[in-house]
Image (cartoon, rainbow, N blue to C red):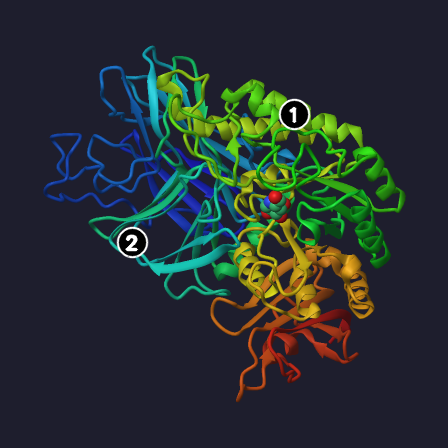
């Protein structure tokens, strides 16, 4: 593992335990992309670049018709001197030109991984966990440098990649495009996999064969969004859950992004990912730098399952931070679907008391506790307690709840302001807006301009006041509308297109300040559910409310889709009431429990209205989750049957030492004439013997994985099984 430089051939070979990534400097200047794929011990020039005269391709050297950027697989392509594919960068100059020619200048290889100033990124805890290559390219005319930064992890098949632009020239430049990564594949034999969705319908999976031309996943909404996710994977056509090659890219960023694949004229494929150039530019004055967000690139030879396990583990251990990273997360009860805005201290206390009785550990008071917020028409920005609902104040309520032995958590939507609020009346220019244009509302609210330091300062101060005023150990950080009229009152005209990215940088700085100031508070990210479920947010907040859709059957897809990249511990999942508030479906309490227990578990319903029988079930669910919590939250996740492909869904959690496992099975509709279902587990040790808790029977790991287990015949819709296995010995 590590990074090797063959000086004679100017080849950089980046190695992870299972993958290799090779770059070659061509003709002393052009960084060419040689290879990304299964690990090879030494690169000995097996796949050299092909230099042939393509007739109409432009040639930088008139004496050499065989050399053209039109055909060279590149590492960080530009535009204007022969390459007509998607450029990775563009820089506008004072003479009106956007042409740049980045050529190799120098490089540096060192142990460790540099931090990215102001941006979330994967990290290491010891220098020997990773090695980094900085490849310095320069445009001689403008003095623009691009430092291509690659970090290989020694224990993960992942490469982190980003770019820092340093302006060493003397003339102002405008970055028009500054993508984080670009890779030229030598062929086009791939399927492309991306996620799509909507509010309450997040993380659906789209897989389609690559077609000639450009195919894109992107956001122009100011947030990574539920509509798309900053992720793109290329799969060999036969690759599936367990086999075949997958090349995946995920951007550690929470704003507008673009991820695209372009099948080019000679059936090669360029993939790139980064901040969406749409609506973006950045003024770079001499001496300044611009750092792009980080991309995590994962190569898997074990299909999507192999890819997911790398992402899941890397994000759980080297992206998430703070004291909660490795801590079991509390089972919570949230009052939102129980009361919506209609509650008082007594009601919240009663729900908490029931929760405590049933074994829950954290009461989360959701929207409606501040200002005069009886509905979504007002008060965002006014973070002062509503004494009509909580007459004895927040501290009093929090202490009553902590006095019961429950933790107390609180909802905020810090990035927003209601036009009907004291904050807006005092500071009408604090929201994103464009002078003289109407301000478009969403859910009756406007978005605060987080590109401004004073606005960020207000958020930190207002939240710090509340967090210091009561024993609060959990925050739900919501964000319920996308950005419109993306302009800032403080930026000059030529910098208005920086507003979207400055907003995200402002958000990250606020999160950095608050999470550092309150290290004992567990932060959960939310954007109308999973609308900003991305690695950028996971860096600051180790869990996310996965969807406002709490219906167990809908959740099978949401959670399955999320698991492709994001670990189960990061996925907030609650049992809610029936008929379900989003889809009106009635599902058994067991099934609701088993789906929610497959993530970061909690409840969101009026516990005081449950029947004694329901309470018995809930109590046993809570007790069971406590027993298996570390396995679910920190074990390996294996997808077995996909809800996108049939009536049945199954997945398994296996502990690192393979001694414990949970196998979950769900069937949506009962159907006549069904075959007897046999379910094959995954991830077990074939040499171990496992006791099946529910029957007491002992099976070999090989038997459970290769022959499978016959499931009982259960009639009815929306049924589930949740089985535990523990190692009893070896066979
Ligand atoms: C949207 C969130 O996703 C819900 O869980 C809830 O917190 C509401 N906002 C409150 O307004």
Front residue of 481/340: it is 340
* Secondary structure of residue under mark 1: helix
Q: Which residue is drawn at 62% across and 79% down?
A: 708
Q: Which residue is drawn at 68% across and 61% down?
A: 577
Quadrant location of the N terminus in the rendered image: top right
Q: Which residue is drawn at 70% across and 46% down?
A: 342
Front residue of 162/377: it is 377
State the image coordinates of residue 548 (x, y, percent, origin top left).
58, 52
State the image coordinates of residue 321 (x, y, percent, origin top left).
66, 38
How far is mark 1 from mark 2, CA to CA?
50 Å
Q: Which residue is drawn at 49% across and 36% down?
A: 294
| Labels 1 and 2 touching (C-beta < 8 A) | no
Residue named by callout 2: 187
- Which residue is farthest bottom? 673
Quadrant location of the C terminus in the rendered image: bottom right
Q: In this orientation, does residue 155 appear? A: no
Label 1 near ligand 1 (CB < 8 Å): no
State the image coordinates of residue 465 (x, y, percent, origin top left).
73, 25
State the image coordinates of residue 593 (x, y, percent, origin top left).
70, 64
Q: Residue 520 carries which label?
A: none
Residue named by callout 1: 460
Label 2 near ligand 1 (CB < 8 Å): no
* Vertical side of 517 occupied by 640: above or below: below
Q: Which of marks 1 and 2 is in front?
A: 1
**Residue 24 occupies quadrant:** top left
User: How many residues crowd around disc 2 within 10 Å: few (fewer than 14), some, or many (20 or more)?
Assistant: few
* Secondary structure of residue under mark 2: loop
């Amino acid at each position: 593992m590590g990074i090797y430089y063959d000086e004679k051939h100017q080849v950089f070979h980046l190695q992870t335990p299972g993958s290799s990534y090779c770059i070659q400097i061509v003709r002393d200047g052009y960084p060419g992309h040689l290879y990304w794929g299964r690990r090879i011990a030494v690169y000995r020039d097996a796949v050299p670049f092909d230099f042939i005269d393509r007739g109409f391709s432009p040639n930088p050297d008139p004496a050499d018709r065989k050399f053209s950027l039109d055909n060279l697989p590149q590492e960080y392509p530009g535009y204007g001197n022969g390459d007509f594919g998607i450029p990775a960068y563009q820089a506008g100059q004072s003479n009106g030109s956007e042409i740049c020619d980045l050529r190799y200048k120098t490089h540096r290889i060192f142990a460790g991984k540099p931090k990215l100033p102001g941006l979330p990124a994967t990290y290491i805890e010891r220098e020997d966990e990773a090695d980094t290559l900085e490849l310095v390219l320069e445009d001689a005319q403008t003095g623009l440098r691009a430092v291509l930064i690659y970090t290989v992890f020694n224990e993960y098949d992942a490469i982190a990649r980003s770019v820092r632009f340093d302006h060493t020239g003397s003339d102002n430049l405008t970055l028009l495009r500054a993508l984080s990564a670009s890779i030229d594949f030598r062929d086009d034999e791939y399927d492309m996999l991306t996620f799509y969705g909507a509010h309450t319908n997040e993380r659906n999976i789209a897989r389609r064969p690559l077609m000639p031309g450009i195919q894109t996943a992107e956001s122009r909404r100011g947030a990574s969004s539920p509509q798309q996710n900053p992720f793109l994977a290329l799969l060999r056509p036969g690759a599936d859950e367990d086999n075949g090659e997958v090349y995946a890219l995920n951007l550690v960023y929470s704003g507008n992004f673009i991820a695209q694949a372009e099948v080019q004229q000679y059936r090669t494929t360029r993939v790139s990912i980064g901040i969406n150039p749409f609506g973006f530019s950045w003024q770079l004055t001499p001496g300044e730098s611009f750092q792009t967000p980080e991309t995590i690139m994962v190569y898997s030879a074990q299909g999507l399952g192999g890819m997911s396990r790398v992402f899941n583990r890397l994000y759980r251990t080297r992206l998430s931070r703070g004291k909660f990273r490795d801590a079991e997360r509390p089972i919570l009860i949230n009052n939102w679907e129980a009361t919506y805005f209609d509650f008082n201290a007594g009601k919240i206390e009663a729900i908490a008391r029931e929760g405590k009785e049933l074994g829950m550990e954290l009461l989360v008071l959701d929207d409606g506790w501040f200002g005069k917020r009886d509905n979504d028409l007002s008060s965002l920005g006014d973070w002062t307690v509503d004494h009509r609902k909580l007459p004895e104040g927040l501290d009093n309520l929090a202490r009553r709840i902590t006095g019961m032995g429950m933790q107390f958590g609180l909802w905020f939507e810090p990035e927003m302001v209601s036009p009907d609020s004291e904050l807006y009346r005092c500071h009408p220019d604090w929201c994103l807006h464009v002078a003289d244009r109407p301000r478009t509302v969403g859910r009756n609210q406007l978005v605060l301009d987080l590109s401004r330091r004073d606005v960020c300062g207000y958020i930190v101060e207002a939240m710090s006041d509340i967090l210091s005023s009561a024993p609060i150990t959990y925050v739900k950080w919501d964000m319920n509308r996308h950005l419109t009229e993306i302009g800032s009152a403080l930026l000059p005209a030529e910098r208005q297109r920086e507003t979207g990215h400055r907003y995200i940088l402002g958000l990250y700085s606020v999160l950095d300040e608050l999470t550092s100031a309150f290290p004992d508070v567990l932060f959960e990210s939310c954007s109308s559910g999973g609308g900003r479920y991305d690695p950028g947010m996971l860096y600051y907040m180790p869990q996310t409310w996965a969807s406002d859709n709490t219906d167990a059957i809908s959740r099978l897809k949401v959670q399955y889709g999320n698991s492709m990249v994001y670990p189960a511990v990061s996925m907030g999942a609650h049992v809610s009431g029936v008929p379900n508030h989003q889809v009106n479906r009635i599902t058994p309490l067991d099934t609701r429990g088993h789906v929610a227990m497959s993530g970061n578990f909690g409840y969101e319903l009026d516990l005081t209205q449950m029947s004694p029988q329901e309470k018995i079930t809930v109590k046993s669910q809570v007790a069971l989750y406590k027993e298996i919590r570390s396995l679910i939250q920190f074990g390996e996740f294996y997808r077995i049957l996909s809800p996108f492909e049939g009536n049945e869904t199954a997945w398994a959690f296996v502990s690192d030492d393979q001694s414990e496992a949970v196998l979950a099975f769900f069937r949506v509709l009962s159907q006549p004439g069904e075959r007897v279902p046999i379910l094959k587990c995954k991830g077990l040790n074939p040499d171990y013997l496992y006791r099946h808790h529910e029957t007491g029977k002992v099976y070999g790991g090989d038997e459970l994985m290769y022959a499978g287990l016959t499931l009982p015949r259960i009639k009815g819709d929306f049924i589930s099984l949740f089985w535990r296995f523990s190692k009893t010995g070896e066979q």
